[in-house]
Amino acid sequence: MNGSSKYRGLFVAMTVFLLVIAVVAGLNFYIATRVDQDAVSVNLSGRQRMLSQRIAKTIFLAQQAKEEAERIAAIEELRGAVKLFDTTLSGFRTGGEVTGGDGKPVVLAKAPVALDAISDAVNLWSGYQKLLGDFLDSPAPAQNDAALNSLGVYARTNNVKILQLMNDLTTALERQAQQRAATLRVIQLTAIVIALSLFAYVVFFSLRNLRRADTELVAAKAETDNILSTVKDGLFLVDRELTIGQQQSKSLEQILGVKSVAGRNLLDVLARMVPEKTQATAKSFLELLFGERVKESLMGEVNPLKEVEVSTPTEDGRIATRYLAFQFRRVLTDGQLTHLLVSTADVTSEVELRQELDRAKRRGEQQITLLTKMMHLGNDELVEFIDKMNRGLDEMNGILATAGTSRQGTMGKLAQVYRIVHTIKGDAAALDFEPIESWAHQIEDQVAKLRGHENLAGSDLLPLTVSLRDMYQQLEGVREMVDRLGQVRRSLDSGRPARRLAPVWNKAEMIARKVADREQKRVEFSINASHDVEIPDTAYHEVSDALVQLVRNAIVHGIEPPQVRTAEGKPAIGRVVLTVRPGTNRNIEIAVEDDGRGIDLERVRDKAITLGLASRQQAQAMMPKDLVRLLFSSGFSTKDDVTEDGGRGVGLDVVEQSIARVGGRVAVGSKPGQGSRFTLTIPQTSGVSA
């Protein structure tokens, strides 16, 4: 039995029921309308009785009035009553708009009953009207006693007749209204009986089919439950309001990590797992899927939830990061798009495997890049870089291992970490080790962001430990490649009483070239020193770091852009000169000199006020040497913007601290518009070769 034949009886019963309802509703509306009209007619016929008496009364009052004012008032009242009676009587006779009991216009239907009474009333009123017209239309009705007396005679003779005729009209209209109300009750009672009979049939038919449908539904649900409990993916439906349906696969809650999702909005469920930006993109995507003009086959590639990273709480209170894949298929009902079938799967293992392969590929590419660059470097430079970077990372690890107990303590640790990373970055840049340089720059950005936190605590430094672990891995990769190349010929811990500074010259020249390119400046770098210059081994690293930083500063802060230099009458190419010479008391002097803009003391003064290092009054009182000393303050920079090579306020303070650790000192000389000279004086016990 197909669906149409199974429910044919129900369809017939419902059709008859609807027809009965429609007919009854139509009759109800028609009769109720007529009843309303009858009510208006009865009300106005009653008013006609009152007006007939009122007309006679005002005529008599006008006759008896002793004062002219009283007569005029009675005449005006008579005029209004006459007009109202006349228009209403005309309405009963022919139908039309009259003034209702509330003073507002109403439509009065032509009276279908008491036609004789209306006709007799019209005849009597015609005579009344003529006399009323002669009286009311006269130039001075108040003095027209003759016309008034004629009216009085006519009123005494015909008033009772007109009243009786209006009573007959009212009685006939009331009888007509009662008949229609009775008819309406009969129709309603008949409709109720028919409706109850049809309802009883529908209930009986529905219960019989409901029992049959329940049996089929139980069997179908059992099959559906078996499917949903077996399938591994999370399956569910969402409607146009993105409400999740009541039926889902058993594995859905486990995959999503959310319980009781039925009836909830899909976007609300996603809000606990994905960032706000992903939520907004997913909402737009789902709205497009429900659009009739968008092809489903073209939407798969732009699915923002095709592979999405989610964060869900675990039973032990931790937050687990997983990867879920959502697929959407349109569901059509009778050709209309009503739902989306959503399939979701946990693809964490696949994504992690792919990520690991990508990381291995990147590591291989980086190792090839590093290997290529190391082949052009000498043994001393590689050993030096590995040794120094290893010591820097160990020092950084020790700093991060002990969390600060206050914001001030944590800020101090950040400053130490920054100096270490900044030094590693400079060394890597000098050797053109771009992967390590890039990593160090990212750490600098992390530290810069942490410095801006108002409520900084030791736990905020935890993300830095992840970066530290990555850097250890990179360092290990460099060390392994050095071993494979056979370029390491001495122990990382071995040293010499003195070291030549020649590798430092190469490093300084390389960093000068890279910084000039990044800053878009033209610089000629020259060295006035012998390759045989030596300094104590204990001072080698500090001097190397200081010189790299001074060369960087000379280009970033000293040398002007070519267009500025030519506008000031200088050569477009700036000069940076590194000079080494013997000093007094067996010292060695190393100077970095540029022909740039020099130190702008007024700008230093303004920056000191802006950074809160001095009040305006204190800054104005500072001598030039005091202002120069501010350049060595941690966090101080005259550069407004932050770039890869400057603007963070870490540089000269590192130089001063490094040189101070080996017993040296830093001197500064500068002339506005002509350039600056930074001189390092280093104790040397083994002498200087030149």
Image (tube, rainbow, N blue to C red):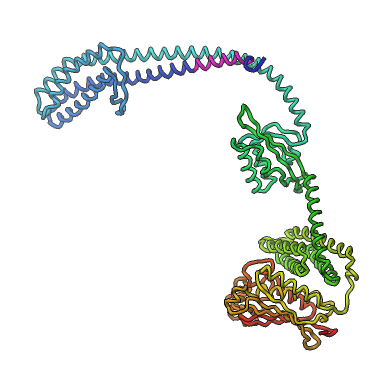
**Which quadrant is home to the C terminus?**
bottom right
Tally of marks: 0
Considering every residue shown, the one lying at the far bottom of the view is: 584
Quadrant where the N terminus sits is: top right
Q: Does the image show residue 251?
A: yes
Q: Residue at x 30, y 16 (%)?
A: 111
Q: Is residue 641 above or below residue 93?
A: below
Quarter where residue 325 is shown:
top right
Left or right: 170 in relation to 634: left
At 30% across and 25% down in the image, what residue appears?
100
> Is residue 390 at all visible to an observer of this figure?
no
Which of 194/687 is in front? Answer: 687
Q: Nearer the viewer, residue 187 or 157?
A: 187
Quadrant in the picture for residue 565: bottom right
Q: Is residue 380 above or below residue 251?
A: below
Q: What stretch of residues is rendered in magenta?
A: 6-21
Residue 589 location in percent, x, y? 76, 83
Let me know if residue 11 is in the magenta part: yes
Give the residue drawn at x 78%, y 88%. Answer: 584
Q: Please tell me which residue lies in front, 485 or 492.
A: 485
